[in-house]
Amino acid sequence: MSDKGDVDLTGAKQNTGVWLVKVPKYLSQQWAKSSGRGEVGKLRISKQQGKAEVSFTLNEELTTIDGIGEKAALVRAPREHPFTMQTVGGQTLAVFTESSSGQSDTDGSSSGTGTGPDKIALEGVVVQRAECRPAVSDNYMRLKRLQIEESSKPVRYSQQLEKPVTTNYKPVANHANNLEYDKKKKEEGKRARADKQQVLDMLFSAFEKHQYYNIKDLVDITKQPVIYLKEILRDIGTYNVKGTHKNTWELRPEYRHYQGEEKSE
Amino acid sequence: MASLGGGGSSATEYVVRVPKNTAKKYSIMAFNAGDKVNCSTWTQARMERDMSNRRMYAEEEATEGAAGSEFGKKQREEARRKKYGIITREFKAEDQPWILKVNGKAGKRFKGQKKGGVTENASYYIFTQCPDGAFEAFPVHGWYNFTPQAKHRTLTAEEAEEEWGRRNKVVNHFSIMVQRRFREPERGDDEEEEGEKGGKKKKKGGRGGDLRIHDLEDDLEMSSDDSDSSMGEDGEGKSKKKVSDAKGKGKKKKGSKRNAAEDSDDGDFEGVEVDYMSDDTSSEEDEPEKVKPSKTEDVPKGVDEMSDSEEESEEEKQNEEETKEEEEEEEGKKTPVHMEKKKKKGEKDSSGESDTSDDSDIEGEAASALFMAKKRTPPKRGGGRGSTGSSRTGSRPGTPSIDSGSTSNTLRAAANKLEQSKRQMPPVSSETPAAKRLKMEPSPQSPQPSGKSTPQPASGKSTPSSSDVQLTEEAVRRYLIRKPMTTKDLLKKFQTKRTGLSSDQTVNVLAQILKRLNPERKNINDKMHFYLTE
């Protein structure tokens, strides 16, 4: 097991050459449908008059397209795909792999097994670039047309309704929310003034947690009537009008003892 | 695997497989061809994600605790974001750049940034050939462009902008980085650094060090006696050049910055080389500093000539020698010829110093090339000893007689030099040294008691008859010959402080003098002016 981050350089040392091939989207979709060992087709490389010609032939069973709509069954993916070879040019391309789980790769060319998270291995260097092009045929044209039609459909569309929608809102004497609210209020009743000392205790413990409080929040916490609470607050605290903590109450400096501040009581 | 022969061309067919469940994700590592990266030469490599951007996305919880926090702040922030529709992008580890380190610490470093849009419209596959002859195709999940990272130090954006502004002036580019390194550690390290590089590079000056050779317009060589700091302090034995150098390059200051700041003042020092009176030089280094600010002040002031009130008040500050200076000022307004006359009338101290100081002073004056003398300058000059020639510059040009502090001794010499010096550009420094010299000189000078200031005022005030500034018929006559003046002007000329008389007395004496002189009258601007023709 190697340290995370170490790159396995066996591929680079062997200078394994690989090809980088650009494949059209529909073809890669077809390839994804392959079964078994994953055989998708055949690659033919021939040398004619000094030039290498590469062509790929898609397997028969993979030519069926699962598309949406009625036309799908009629259209089939083309089978012949000549490759256009290109030079690697102004870039040095290397291939590296990340493996996130401990599965070993049975193929010979890959190196290393990922036993830890994100094992990185250098597989090789790109020696040839190619583009896979479909051979032009009626099949292909139909396929393309289908694709265009699909993509040109607007995402949103308007639909006419026959009857008005009656499932959402119905007139109600009193909404459920309101009923609950009223019940809650009745239970709670009016807030009663507790002992001043008790309220002070509650306030101090609240200010221990946070420095700035809104008056509403304090009312919530202490369950005291607002006027009473404000009186008490005026004794021990100040009201912040300006600054970042606007309209908030905080304790007076002499009562404070925060870690961040360097004041003490 | 099956080979087909036919048609004269050879073709081989290979099976293409797309493995289904592979745990490995393939990505492309792209290097620029110019970087000449050869993966096979790497002995060891480490690569990991660059997580430095995580902070940007994560919300910083500055204060969880009590101090500075608000109740319900998080909820409020969230509600606010929703209200305004602010959507913060998530931090996706997958999209972060890679950091690749090759061959350990001493090797290269690369940063690999993800290239977007690769898998959108077409898929890339990696075709590798297996031992059994078949091809295997693996889809590419990401494309990263790797660029080498500089290990050497670079300038920050602000520094780069500064240097860009100076690109036409800087010749020695090595020093840019060297100085940058200086600024970071203590200044005391300068010397060490310089010791290292002294021989190799030309210094832009401004760095502390023994030998300075300037690349810039000043081709002056500064020989520093001691280390940087001493340059400013030791005043002895330094030529005036040093002043300019110090001024321009800053003894203790880092050269480049100082240089840039002082570029505009370079011209002031052109005439410095003239004077080599090393004996007389006092600590000029201080002067430049003071001089500079004062000089700039003076110049604009100097332009307003007849701002009597200003001048007068300043004079009072400086006073002492003022008596002479006052006269000189007035004459300074006129042609140098008059100046000379006045100067001759003035008292003279030891000419030795005065000469030198005069030279410097005069040069300074001429340099400014302003027209009218400023009363101001003379008084300032006089007091300038103390105030380091703040007054100097302003009034120079027109008033050769205005020798700061040299009132008595330098008058004649100043007048003589004035015409010579007019051609030269007296550097500010000259004035300052002059001023300084005057300061120091007075003490050793026997003719004048230490501190010209003291004798002068004494002489001026206590002996009305001898001082030029005194309210004499001669003085009035001179004024009136020069130009028509009102009584008010005349009174201003003979200020009570100068003449030592009270205002009443001044008025009386002036009236008597006028009766005696019987000047002609003329009405200018509805005011009665007196004048004499001779």
Image (cartoon, rainbow, N blue to C red):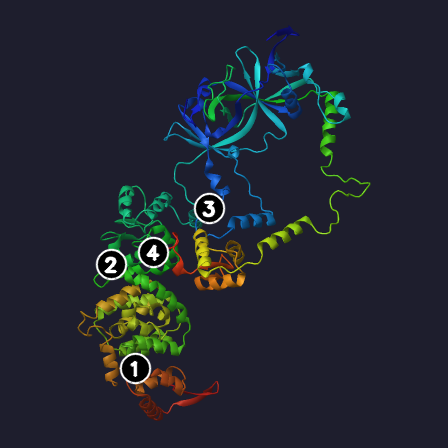
The quadrant the N terminus of chain A occupies is top left
Q: Which residue is mark 3?
A: B61
Q: Nearer the viewer, mark 3 or mark 1?
A: 3
Q: Nearer the viewer, mark 3 or mark 2?
A: 3
Q: Nearer the viewer, residue A168 or B186?
A: A168
Estimate how packed mark 4 is, as few (under 14), some (14 to 19) or many (20 or more) residues with alpha carbons within 10 Å: many
Q: Which residue is mark 1?
A: B498
Q: Which residue is mark 4?
A: B248
Q: Nearer the viewer, residue B357 or B193?
A: B193
Give the chain of mark 3: B
The reply, left or right, for residue A164 in relation to residue A40 is right
* Lower sequence index among marks 3 and 2: 3
Q: Is residue B149 visible?
A: yes
Q: Nearer the viewer, residue B185 or A127?
A: B185
* Lower sequence index among marks 1 and 2: 2
List x then y, in percent, for residue A44: 62, 13
Discs 2, 4 touching: Cβ within 8 Å: no
SS state under label 4: helix
Q: CA distance from mark 1 to mark 4?
A: 39 Å
> Which amino acid is tagged 4?
Gly
